[in-house]
Amino acid sequence: MAAPVNPPRGMRDFLPADKARRERALATIKRIYAQHGFDEIETPVVEEFARLHSGLGGDNEKLAYSILKRGLSSDDLRTSADADDTTSLTDLGLRFDLTVPLARYYASHRAELPTVFRALQTGPVWRAERPQKGRYRQFVQCDIDIIGEAGPLAEIELVAATVAALDALGIVGATVRINDRRILTRLLASWGVADHFGERALITIDKLDKVGVDGVVAELADLGIDTAGVGEALTEIGAGGWSLLEGDVPAWLDTEAYEDLLALRAALPDVELVFDPTLVRGMGYYTGTIFEVAHPESGSSVAGGGRYDGMIGRFLGQDVPAVGFSIGFERILDLVRDPDDARPGSLVLVYDPALAAGRLAELKRGALALDAYSRVRLERRPRNLKGLLDSLAAEGWTTFATVGPDTEELEPRPLS
């Protein structure tokens, strides 16, 4: 028996109908983002190893795929003096997100770009994840970023464009949760959390929706943090939402961040914005506003992002304000409402084997010249015509016409 021929674990093949559906969704996202003034760019799928492991990617750096230096082989890796240190053997790696490549791109081309640069970037990224439902080793990201705008206008534009893209895909009922890293820093300080506990404490707080208040308090205590009053504070904060920003401002609330969040809310009256002071997001490079899109039919966020003013300075030598928003493309596909009329008109000419090739070519040219059809395919008529038609309908074709030696004019019929 032949061994199964499958793609590597965590990676997938897409049949024509699936690929067409993905491309329609991607085209919708890119169209909306272009309408909002974002310019599409492209970066290599490979970046320098040192850049990918410069401390900007958080835990994702541990999941990066590395590439052996040219001329080396797997035998060199096996015989390395230190199997845990591969830096002497690798000089390149596959990108694990689109943000680090964008920061490098901007540092490379700053002189050729506008003062405020609105970037759109889509493409595959790779992470050595443990494959499971909804988590892949190769997946597509859809990012928009604004570089060079320090004020809340950047966040306003990003949220508006992302919500518009989701609406265009038929994804309704989404909620945008927002917070600010400056608020989280002040919150930890109000609890007396020492700086060296900061990132670990934030990782724990990020689990609030999974383990609850008691679970967070217990884990913070395990870290050695004095949790007196933390449980009560988390309960009060979780129930507060925007009401926390009304009346007397809490002592732990950063005033500048507070003003930015209010400006964001006022500028987006039609967007369901929820202030969540416990929203963390995992990337350590965030410096200000952070946001995440939740949907009732998804167990995970479907989009997210934030401000990362310190990242580009690592490459450029001077800080440049930057903020980005990324749609979880693989996650939203399950939520996309793809009506029948979203499929472009397509025609299959099911021909009699006795028909001359020249006549077939003529019929296909004539069909392609019609505005009604974006695609035309020739299919030899089999004995089981119904089986062929069912298969074509499943692949997304919309109409067919049978043609033979005596056909003068096409008579298209719907496939389903």
Image: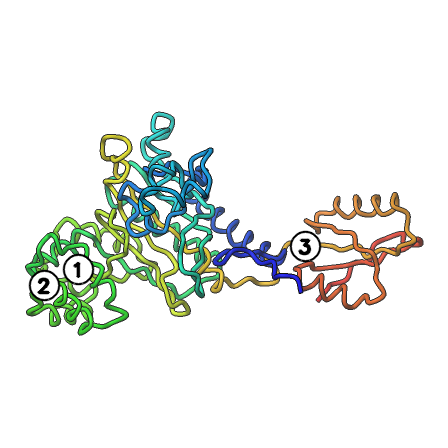
Indicate the position of residue 254 as horizontal and vertical percent values: 12, 53
Indicate the position of residue 294 as horizontal and vertical percent values: 35, 63
Q: Nearer the viewer, residue 176 or 283?
A: 283
As shown in the figure, which amino acid type bears the numbered disc 1?
Ala
Q: Find out whether the residues at labels 2 and 1 contact each other: C-beta distance under 8 Å.
A: yes
* Quadrant (top left, top right, bottom left, bottom right) of the C terminus: bottom right
Which residue corresponds to the image point at 36% horizontal and 42% vertical from the top-left?
Answer: 80
Q: Earlier in the sequence, mark 3 or mark 2?
A: 2
Number of numbered tags placed on the structure image: 3
Which residue corresponds to the image point at 70% horizontal and 54% vertical from the top-left?
Answer: 346
The residue identified by callout 1 is: 201
Identify the mark at residue 225; answer none if there is no mark: 2
Indicate the position of residue 300 as horizontal and vertical percent values: 37, 64
Q: Quadrant of residue 183?
A: bottom left
Label 2 Cα neighbours within 10 Å, binned few <14 / some 14-19 / many ≥20: some
* Quadrant (top left, top right, bottom left, bottom right) of the N terminus: bottom right
Q: Nearer the viewer, residue 396 or 242?
A: 396
* Left or right: 249, with 92 as reference point: left
Q: Nearer the viewer, residue 130 or 85?
A: 85
User: Is residue 314 shown above or below 256?
Assistant: above
- Secondary structure at badge 1 equals helix
The residue identified by callout 3 is: 345
